[in-house]
Amino acid sequence: MEETGMSWSPIYSGLIGGLIVAAMVFLTNNKSKVEGDVHHLEFGLLFKGFSIAIIPFTAFVLYAMVQSYEGQEIAASLVGGGFVAGAIFFPYQAFFVKFSYDNDHIYFKSPIAGDTKTSWKDLEKVGYSWVLQADYIIVSGIGRIWCSNMLNGYEELMEFISGKRK
């Protein structure tokens, strides 16, 4: 039993989570996979592993949510809902969304948006979301494409876009 009423567990778990995210960013390759003139941006193995691991962890969180004490239903539902959203979003982004580009075109493929090819001339906006901590581009005919700094080739893409915007 702790006498101070303070638990170190939240601090440890926050540090571990921060280290995992930092590792996913720092172990990202600056260069994209290139086939001919086409640059393919994809997530690295650590991000893909995290995306898979979050699924059974979400099942554990949902089990714990069902075991929550009376009066904690709302908080437990919010936490469980966040994990379910993450267990859907991360694998979707890691395995089902494909983003490539060359000097003239943007290639985007996802189960929701379909398979699209459009010109860089259709680039409408380059922005940043503070909430998601990710850059994005808005392209006419595609919509918003999220550009995470955990994508292999992210820095190369940002340099390329900077050159296109001049």
Image (spheres, grey):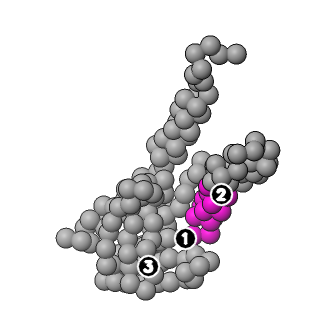
Nearest-to-viewer mark from 2 and 1: 2
Return the residue found at the far front.
Answer: 71
Q: Which mark is residue 62?
A: none
Q: Residues within 10 Å of mark 3 (few under 14, many from 20)?
A: few
Image check: 65 left or right of 155? right
Amino acid type, label 3: Gly
Front residue of 37/46: it is 46
Nearest-to-viewer mark from 3 and 1: 3
Q: What's the residue at 48%, 41% (across, down)?
A: 22
**Prevailing SS of the magenta stretch:** helix
Is residue 42 visible to the viewer in this orientation of the structure? Answer: yes
Image check: 14 left or right of 161? right
Q: Which mark is residue 143?
A: 3
Q: Answer with mark 3 or mark 1, whichever residue precedes in sequence.
A: 1
Q: Which of the 4 quarters of the picture holds residue 9? A: top right
Which secondary structure lies at badge 1? strand
Return the residue found at the far top.
Answer: 3
Q: What's the residue at 50%, 83% (across, down)?
A: 116
Q: Which mark is residue 98?
A: 1
Q: Quickly name the residue at label 2.
A: 81
Amino acid type, label 1: Lys
In the figure, 119 relative to 54: above or below? below
Residue 19, image x and y in percent? 52, 36
In the figure, 101 relative to 90: above or below? below
